[in-house]
Amino acid sequence: MAVFSPAGVLLLSVLGLAACALGRPNPLSWDGHWPTTSPVHSEHHVKDTDTSATYHQHVQRASRRYSRVLGSSVEKRFNQAVIENAVSHLQETQANASAPVNLLILDESNNPNPEGSGFSPIGLEIALVQPVIRAEQPRQPNSIGLDIQANDIGYIATVQIGTPPKNFSLFVDSGSSDLWVGHEECKGYDVGDCGAHTFLGNSSTTFNNTGDPWHIRYGAGFVLGKIVTDLVSIAGLQLKAPHKFGVAMEESPEFASSKVPYDGFLGTAKSHLSQQHAPTLIEALRNEGLVKEGIVSYHIPRALDTMKAGVPVKNVGELTLGAMNPAKFNASTLVTVRNVSPTGFWEAPVDEVRVNGTSIGLARRSAILDTGSTLLVAPKVDVSAIHMLIPGSLYTGTRWIIPCTTNATISLVISGQEFPIDSRDLLFLPLNMGRLKGYCWSSISEMQGVSKPKGTNIGKTGGKTTSWLVGDVFLKNVYFSTNLDRDTISIARLAEQPDLAASEATELEDKAAN
């Protein structure tokens, strides 16, 4: 197994950037060694020593998803503001170049925790090279592994579709409800074809195109297509009846590029959100009796946890259908709450928010649990209240930055149980890749000017929404499960060593077999 020195990390980073310039089309996969070639997704790739553009893209993506949660009137206002925000970002970047305090060369002498480890060199390498880190195949019944896209940008599961069945890599998204893959005749919007992906069509003998149109827009990108039916299998669970879902006839560049490491989406929110007006995959499995209840359970993995002391270890991310995996969580911390979303999202009520153990007075908030979002996005006043208690945090006028050496702990209290966020997850990227103990972009971001729109059921305090879009920055720290039959959400702290727990379970099974 390879052990990387700082020089080795730097060399791999340079090789990754060089391969990006060559434009190799194939996504990378984890084979036990760190890859040294092209990135998988140019939209998320870190190209400069100034990482502000990459961060800005993620904030815009998450904010667009957030606006969709709040209703069409807010989404329309957000879309109108995108151009204004882009201009503002450009002006800010230009101003920073000549400002008295350049964000890229902030004085680190004021760092309140100078002995902290800083942004991980391995984490930076992952952000540069953008691999797909393949998951270990779970032993838990009705479960599949969750591959990690780059530096925790997203998570990918493998589903079989068609006759003969093909493997499709699908982006797992608890913030949407639709399943779709590309059609064999798919075209890219302004980019030619739909890239080097797996496609579905008449090559499947059980494929049926209904001809009905559908479309969907995400935080970044859109898809236009047709409603179809075909046989679907996931985690060894084979639907007997053809399942209704979508194929993409046209994809925006965010999906059509060969550098995108997935072939479509697997939406796991409630069918209320479906743009295809179809049952979700978990509903279909439940309806056929393949699972007893409509439960989807998640262990969202962290890329940094696939490397221990310079040695690669297993990615134990997992998606379980119809049940929870008790080996993955601490049962004494398990809470179950009602889903408070009236529109089909998975939204948990939050009792309070704590920073370094201190409650900051943000009561009656709620968390929309969205595996498709990297960041946590909340109203400006809430985000400011959090960062004011993080030592060394600074506000740029639109975004928050925090010391890369921070050891701050931010916790959500749900049904009386505290769920802390690992301080590593508060760091999106360093402002300057050459200063890993300098300042980092915060993974908790604001969406400005979002108030409660008329005609929605979103709660408000002082005219502001109380709903947060809570992405992987939090979800990597918990085991969570959704139950569509009971309309509940269960959350627990992770088992301290989930990979060890899985290993011990395997040993017990082997002993029992012998």
Image (tube, rainbow, N blue to C red):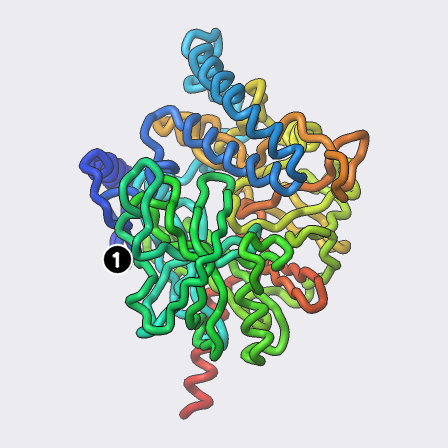
Name which quarter of the figure residue 465 lies in.
Answer: top right
Assign the C terminus to one quadrant of the image: bottom left
Instruction: Judge from the rendering whether residue 363 lies leftward or rightward of residue 429; answer left or right.
Output: right
Q: Residue 182 at what x, y percent from top left?
A: 36, 54
Q: Please tell me whether residue 467 is drawn above or below residue 169 in the rendered image.
A: above
Name which quarter of the figure residue 308 lies in.
Answer: bottom left
Residue at 75% across / 35% down in the picture?
360
Residue at 45% across / 77% down in the picture?
238
Residue 96 seen in this snapshot: yes
Residue 504 seen in this snapshot: no
Residue 131 or 248: which is nearer the viewer? 248
Residue at 74% across / 41% down in the picture?
456
Residue at image mark 1: 1
Per the image, label 1 sits on a secondary structure element best described as: loop
Name which quarter of the figure residue 408 lies in.
Answer: top right
Residue 333 or 136: which is nearer the viewer? 136
Instruction: Judge from the rendering whether residue 180 lies leftward or rightward of residue 191; answer left or right.
Output: right
Q: Residue 89 at what x, y percent from top left?
A: 48, 19
Q: Residue 71 at what x, y percent from top left?
A: 66, 39
